[in-house]
């Protein structure tokens, strides 16, 4: 596993059940609300500051998703909303950055994530992922979705690669 993680050059994420606990609040007007863990978001910012390409592939279509990830420096064109064939969006992301699939870590928790989990270099899931995802995951976190799972896995990879150190001036200049 360690050798596999040393090869990781980029991160791609599902949203619901990964950055959130999967719960969604819906208003009568149709607005959808999600709760994100700030530590997960900071981990994402650290990945950006260390030069990792980052992408989001979700079946969700809410503009609030796009806005949330833009605050974490995910480029607009790397936010795939309404994805129904995540493997196609994953391949587009890899091609854009000239990455091999085995150089990307993917974070997922449910059935639509399985094709990408199988194709990527390291598939990570939270402990509350569905059983079918756990069966194909390379890494199952002890944390549930929306409760630090993303941060924990990002930190693990960046520490292994010697890249987990905050440069306060860089942080101030980018955020």
Image (cartoon, grey):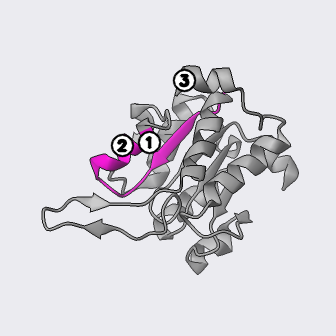
Between residue 105 and residue 33, name the one nearer to us.
33
Q: Mark 2, residues whose alpha carbon is within 10 Å: few (<14), some, or many (≥20)? A: some
Q: Residue 154: within the magenta?
A: no
- In the image, taking residue 150 as reference, residue 164 lies left or right, namely right
Q: Residue 52: within the magenta?
A: yes
Above or below — where is 155 with respect to 24? above
Residue drawn at the location 53% of the way across and 56% of the way down: 37
Residue under pointer 1: 69
Give the residues in magenta.
51-69
Instruction: Give the number of the disc on residue 174.
Output: 3
Real-space Cα separation, disc 1 to disc 2, in angstroms = 5 Å
Pinpoint residue 159: horizontal percent, then vertical percent: 81, 43
Residue under pointer 2: 66
Between residue 47 and residue 88, name the one nearer to us.
47
Pinpoint residue 90: horizontal percent, then vertical percent: 51, 45
Above or below — where is 25 with respect to 93? below
Pinpoint residue 163: horizontal percent, then vertical percent: 78, 34
Q: Quadrant of residue 132?
A: bottom right
Above or below — where is 134 with respect to 115? below
- In the image, taking residue 8 as reference, residue 106 lies left or right, namely left
Judged from the image, the secondary structure of the residue bearing numbered disc 3 is helix
Pinpoint residue 127: horizontal percent, then vertical percent: 64, 73
Mark before the other along the chain sequence, 1 or 3 = 1
- In the image, taking residue 169 as reference, residue 68 lies left or right, namely left
Q: Are marks 1 and 2 in contact (CB under 8 Å)?
A: yes
- In the image, taking residue 53 as reference, residue 168 lies left or right, namely right
Real-space Cα separation, disc 1 to disc 3, in angstroms = 14 Å
Residue drawn at the location 66% of the way across and 20% of the way down: 169
Judged from the image, the secondary structure of the residue bearing numbered disc 1 is helix
């Amino acid at each position: 596993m360690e050798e596999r993680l040393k090869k990781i050059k980029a991160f791609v994420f599902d949203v619901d059940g990964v950055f959130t606990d999967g719960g969604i609040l819906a208003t009568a007007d149709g607005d959808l609300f999600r709760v994100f863990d700030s530590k997960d978001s900071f981990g994402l910012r650290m990945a950006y500051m260390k030069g990792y390409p980052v992408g989001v592939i979700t079946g969700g279509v809410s503009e609030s998703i796009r806005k949330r990830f833009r605050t974490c420096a995910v480029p607009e064109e790397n936010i795939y909303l309404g994805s129904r064939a995540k493997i196609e969006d994953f391949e587009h992301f890899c091609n854009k950055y000239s990455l091999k699939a085995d150089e990307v870590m993917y974070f997922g928790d449910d059935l639509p994530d399985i094709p990408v989990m199988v194709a990527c270099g390291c598939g990570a899931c939270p402990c509350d992922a569905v059983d079918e995802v756990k069966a194909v995951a390379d890494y199952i976190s002890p944390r549930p979705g929306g409760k630090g799972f993303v941060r924990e896995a990002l930190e693990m990879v960046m520490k292994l690669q010697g890249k987990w150190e905050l440069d306060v001036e860089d942080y101030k200049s980018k955020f």
